[in-house]
């Protein structure tokens, strides 16, 4: 499907996909860039990890609030889902299995990724949602199974852009879909990853690289 995010750049970094032991699909936030979120991955990069990051047109995936009706965020929203899907298919086509593929999004990217995973759940190496959650005025109903996929939902209690209630609703939906969900809800008004969040991602990436699987550490409110 044509849309504003199709034909944008797909940034790759880290290990070449053709020889990678694992991969991470990284979805940037509003005002961010694919290059920027690939640089953030330095915090959890391990030898053998391929990084793939789609780029949003004009650096935003959709124009309005993530709690607005999704139809009001079209055509950007559907185009964003397709851009993430294309990035995942690039990884799979290169021979990296989904069970060794981490999906990570921050802010607006986490909102898009939440919907991408919830609408067509399938097991994968892990899902990381930082300061973003499921979209729309209310959380919808979703079917399918993540079959134990590790899921990290993290954010801040005082974030004025992402109500903590939506983070917890998102975590509950992914648990109902069979995800192995860890919540890391921090005090304060921050937006985005903390050092502790990135350390938890680093541990999971290490497990993906060596093929041992695993789960996110530190499932507590901070």
Image (spheres, rainbow, N blue to C red):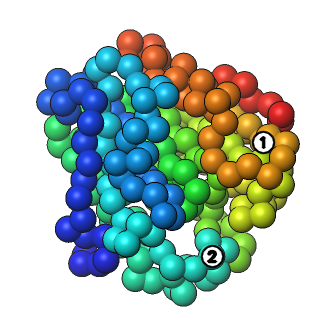
Residue 87 place in picture, x, y as percent:
29, 51
Residue 39 place in picture, x, y as percent:
40, 39
Q: Secondary structure at mark 1?
A: strand
Residue 176 place in picture, x, y as percent:
67, 48
- Write the residue at 30% across / 43% down: 52
Mark 2 near mark 1, Cβ–Cβ under 8 Å? no
Identify the mark nearer the N-term, 2 or 1. 2
Depicted 73 relative to depicted 164: above or below: below
Q: Is residue 210 left or right of residue 18?
A: right
Q: Quadrant of the C terminus?
A: top right
Q: Quadrant of the N terminus?
A: bottom left
Q: Nearer the viewer, residue 178 or 185?
A: 185
Depicted 158 relative to depicted 198: above or below: below
Q: Which residue is mark 2?
A: 65
Compute the Cα span from label 2 to label 1.
Answer: 21 Å
Q: Nearer the viewer, residue 195 or 170?
A: 195
Q: Kindly identify which numbered label has been placed on residue 185.
A: 1
- Write the residue at 64% across / 58% down: 133
Residue 111 place in picture, x, y as percent:
56, 60
Q: Is residue 27 left or right of residue 165?
A: left
Q: Residues within 10 Å of mark 1 (few under 14, many from 20)?
A: many
């Amino acid at each position: 499907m044509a849309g504003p995010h199709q034909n944008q750049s797909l940034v790759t970094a880290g290990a070449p996909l053709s020889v990678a032991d694992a991969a991470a699909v990284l979805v940037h936030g509003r005002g961010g860039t694919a290059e920027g979120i690939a640089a953030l991955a330095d915090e959890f990069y391990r030898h053998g990890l391929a990084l793939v990051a789609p780029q949003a047109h004009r650096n935003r995936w959709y124009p309005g609030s993530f709690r607005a009706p999704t139809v009001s965020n079209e055509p950007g929203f559907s185009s964003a889902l397709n851009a993430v899907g294309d990035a995942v298919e690039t990884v799979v086509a290169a021979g990296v299995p989904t069970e060794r593929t981490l999906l990570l999004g921050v802010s607006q990217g986490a909102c898009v990724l939440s919907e991408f995973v919830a609408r067509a759940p399938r097991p994968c190496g892990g899902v990381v949602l930082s300061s973003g959650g499921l979209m729309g005025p209310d959380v919808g109903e979703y079917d399918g199974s993540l079959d134990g996929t590790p899921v990290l939902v993290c954010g801040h209690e005082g974030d004025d852009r992402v109500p903590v209630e939506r983070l917890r609703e998102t975590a509950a939906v992914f648990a109902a879909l069979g995800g192995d969900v860890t919540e890391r809800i921090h005090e304060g008004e921050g937006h985005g990853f903390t050092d502790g969040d990135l350390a938890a991602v680093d541990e999971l990436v290490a497990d993906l690289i060596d093929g041992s699987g695993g789960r996110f550490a530190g499932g507590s409110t901070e």
